[in-house]
Image (spheres, rainbow, N blue to C red):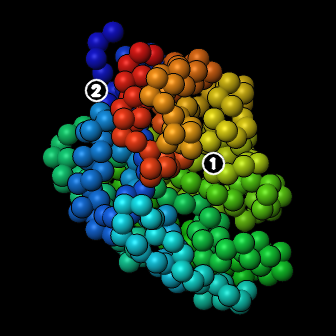
Amino acid sequence: MEIMTKKERIIAAIQKKDVDRPPFSIWYHVPHVDQDPVQLAETQIQIAHNYDMDFIKMMPYGNYSAHDFGLSCTFYCTTTQPAMERKFAIADAKEWKEIEPLPGCFGAHGKQILLARQLQKQLKGEELPYVQTIFSPLTTAKKLAGARVFEDMRTHPEYLHQALKAITETTIDFVKANIEAGVAGFFFATQCANTEWVTEAEYDAFGAAYDLQVIDAYKDLTYFNIAHIHGDNTMFQKVADYPVNCLNWHDRWVSPSMAEARKLSDKCFLGGLNEKWLSTAKTEEIHTHVREAAQAAGRTGLMITPGCVAELDTPEVNFYAARIAVNNL
């Protein structure tokens, strides 16, 4: 089979067609540069080149979507410590009423627009697709308040709905600006679609209702749209049915497995690398690990990636081993 371009390989995988090899990518936090869009773009492009990745999953710091709404963060700006929440924005249920829509190019959101523009500029026409990371509105609300968001959901639902509408409007405006900056699609992450936090009926009302508004804003405009289902005890089927064409979850240590998921969805799967195990794995074990993923999911409709962010202490040699292993699939 002729060698494909990166975009051709990705589109073929999404469409579950034959590929010369499955697409490959990795992602992890880069906290020493993620406050500078120019340097973050430089770093992510260099990482992609180092490992011959097929796409870039953009890596803004994890709390960016909540920062503009009042979350206080501590920025360590080192290679070993990602930014962390310092003080939640919501300490009383009535404070949800203070959340108002913001322009998608404001503040921390604006930095991520600059990141997309810098990738477009620095790639200089190179065909290396990049996808922007966005969070579900309820996930952003959880980042604003911590676990109390679920208490407020039940005691003051009208307040939370008001805030979720504002967060959704902001997210959609952010999405539109990213499309203008040339993103191939979006990595839509939900950290709340699991029974640890909410019932399915609650998620329908406070999660999916807003998730779908965001996804509807780009589903027909971008070609590479991923849903990331985060955590244990997930509502996998609910999110798998969203109008996206790719699914990513902790497939090596959370149910369903790749093989089980194939019975539940015909979408393209991103995964196969256990992001926790990879940091301590022996290189000779990684080839078997990657081969197992391909056997479970099938060679078509598969991209070899982590199930979530890779650990910051993962040795570079292990990333190289994973990339080399993909050549043998």
- Residue at the location (45% across, 65% down)? 82
- Residue at the location (18% across, 52% down)? 122
Give the percent coordinates (x, y) of residue 265.
67, 31
Give the percent coordinates (x, y) of residue 74.
46, 78
149 sits left or right of 47 in the view: right
In this figure, which residue is indicated by the disc labeled 1?
229
92 sits left or right of 299 in the view: right
Helix, strand or loop at mark 2: loop
Q: Quadrant of residue 267?
A: top right
Helix, strand or loop at mark 1: strand
Q: Number of labelled discs?
A: 2
- Residue at the location (72% across, 35% down)? 256
Q: Is the residue marked by circle 2 packed among few (<14), some (14-19), or many (20+) residues within 10 Å?
A: few
Estimate the spatial distance between the alpha carbons at disc 2 and disc 1, rounded to whole Å. 28 Å
In this figure, which residue is indicated by the disc labeled 2?
5
The answer to whether mark 2 and mark 1 are in CB contact below 8 A is no
Rendered position, 218 above or below 142: above
Give the percent coordinates (x, y) of residue 287.
47, 22
Q: Amino acid at mark 2?
A: Thr
Q: Quadrant of residue 89?
A: bottom right
Check the picture and name the quadrant holding the N terminus.
top left
